[in-house]
Image (cartoon, helix red, strand yellow):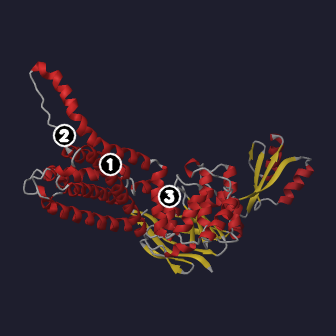
Amino acid sequence: MNILEISELRKSFGDKTVLDGLTLNVPEHSIYGFIGRSGAGKTTTMKIVLGLLRSDSGEVRVAEEKVSFGETATNRFIGYLPDVPEFYGFMTAAEYLRFCGEITGMQGDDIKTRSAELLEAVGLKNEKHRIKGYSRGMKQRLGIAQALLGRPKLLICDEPTSALDPVGRKEILDILQNAREQTTVLFSTHILSDIDKICTDAAILEGGKICLSGGISDLRSKMSSEGYELELSRPEEAAIIAEAFGCETEGCRIVFSEKQHSIGDLMRSLADRSIRPVHLTRLERTLDELFAEVIGK
Amino acid sequence: MSTFASFFRKELTARKRTDKITALTIIFLFLGVLAPATAKFMPKLLEKFGDSMTDSGMTITVSEPTALSSFSQFFGNFSIGLIVMIVMESGVFAGEYSSGTLIPVLTKGLKRAKVYFAKLLTVILLWTVYYWISFSVMYGYTAYYWDTGVVNNGFIAGFSAYAYGLYLLILTAAFSAMASTGIQTLIAVGAVYLGDSLLAMVPKLSDWLPCRLIKVEQIINGKEQPDVLLPAFGVTAALSIAAVIISKHIFDKKPI
């Protein structure tokens, strides 16, 4: 089952069209990366899914139930972590989770056990101070805890790692990866290495539409090997090889396309001339390049 | 605990932990004591002042203070507490809009109506409790020093001033729900107050305006009967209800 189905979503703010026929399906228990530039419409899409913003046209279904603006019935399936999560600074983490449990009608005992579990999972178990003293990373972690409190079917995170240092980022990604067992994760980002690390599926939003989507392995197969990079220890050696193969050098580096020269011929040529390479690397298009190419279309 | 009760309790805890409760307690107790204290000591101060003026030929005669002086001072001063509370509560909604703290709450499914009425109820409760604490303190000290029998319709006058404050605070909450910032709220409340005061200069309108409710001097000294306030009560109540209905409707539709 697809936990989230969006079809032909359109939204404009005044004369600015942000979403122009967005269609997206998120399979259950996936970790779905939602990629797009700043201002592409990722947050707008999420707010429509949450019933916080009214779309101009199109349909959104969560767990096969239709989403309507202002009605939050479908939100019982969703846990949401906003991009800059703000919680009541006068409360402690435990108090805030209890408050969240109460306003969602959870039972007292369930709130206690679930809060303890989640605070442990996000590393805030021993934190007794009030939220107003929290760092950004701590707020993100509390944000995930409150989003998962009600055991949602879909966890939506808006740029959960954007303003974090590498350690903080890794912590959040680990938590999200572990959450996959209990729920489906949809998170937006413009940090492509995050997608690479934990996502099972991804989609790229550009020009108000999804221009590329699918399983991560499918997307990776689009990043087929283009060529090789050879680095030699001296420019003279590079010049010799370059002349033999009709290529250009960049100092000690030469880039070969596999279409033009077979790797076997290259290695034979190096061996014949007794030239020892510094390294010979197969170039793979990175997700960044794929993204840039898709955006450039 | 019901979802409404939980959110309502959050509102009260927020004010306690941000020291608003402490500040209000100090201010309103002070205002309650200030009225009888001023009434009691003002004549002595004026006498001393008068002594130093005799050289220039001015004499000041001050009549003996009575319970009326104390009540009169109270009705003059209570607006200080009202203004403090209006400023404090101008962000009751708008503060959460700018901080974004309502987003997790609404996305979890708490109904907007519950959020709206919990906040409105908190503002009403705070004003009710603190106004009557202040009034009771004033009344207690007044009764201790003077005979309160000379005051006509003291509680009605007290209720009238309470109602005026309640109306302005309901407006504050209503504007806060519709505005984006506390400053916008204060400007709106200020504009309404100004409009009220300006219209009050028109003799035919003056008895129908909310600000009539705080002009109770002639009622407590017996020169006017309380029923002169009825038109103003009616209009004030109607304006308050209208403010609630309109602002709730706007809050329900507001993109958060």
Q: Is residue A78 left or right of residue B45?
A: right
Residue placed under numbered mark 2 in the picture:
B65
Mark 3 or mark 2: which is in front? 2
Q: Quadrant of the C terminus of chain A?
A: bottom right
* Image position, residue B62 (x, y; %): 14, 34
Tag 1: amino acid: Val
Residue placed under numbered mark 3 in the picture:
A39
Q: Is residue A88 visible?
A: yes
- Identify the subunit bearing mark 3: A
Label tally: 3
Q: Quadrant of the N terminus of chain A?
A: bottom right
Pick the front one: A252 or B79: B79
Residue placed under numbered mark 1 in the picture:
B137
Tag 3: amino acid: Gly
- Identify the subunit bearing mark 1: B
- Identify the subunit bearing mark 2: B
Tag 2: amino acid: Pro
Using the rendered image, report if marks 3 and 2 lie on a common chain: no
Residue A143, quarter of the rendered image: bottom right
* Image position, residue B33 (x, y; %): 31, 43
Q: Secondary structure at mark 3?
A: loop
Residue B171, quarter of the rendered image: bottom left
> Callout 3: 10 Å neighbours few (<14), some, many (20+)?
few
